Amino acid sequence: MEHAHDPVLPFVEALLAREDITPTAFGRLAIGDPRLVPDLRNGRELRRLTRERVFRFITNFASAYTPP
């Protein structure tokens, strides 16, 4: 049975591929949840405010993230 995916997932996947960031690091940086991406891939649906936080992180990623 295939899960329905949250609308944010394609945007997350695109950022992961483009920016060479791990799923765990993305989740931790975006909302403090290292399981975010695996959970989204397994069908997790985000609440509206959480989804907005993820979209905001994606939008601001280039200026907000400085590699260690």
Image: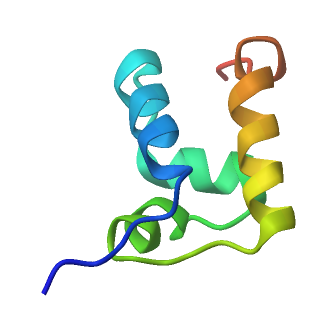
Residue 41 location in percent, x, y?
Answer: 34, 65
* Coordinates of residue 28 in the picture (x, y in percent): 66, 55
The residue located at (75%, 24%) in the rendering is 59
| 56 is higher (above) or lower (below) than 66 | below
- Which sits in the foreground, 45 or 38? 45
Q: Residue furthest left?
A: 1
Q: Outermost residue, bottom direction?
A: 1
Quadrant of the rendering where the C terminus is positioned: top right
Residue 60: quarter of image: top right
- Of 21 and 6, the residue lying toward us: 6
Quadrant housing the N terminus: bottom left
Please, which residue is most extreme toward the top here? 63
Give the quadrant of residue 62: top right
16 versus 24 height, above or below: above
Question: Which residue appears at 81% of the width and 51% of the height?
Answer: 52
Left or right side of 41 for 30: right
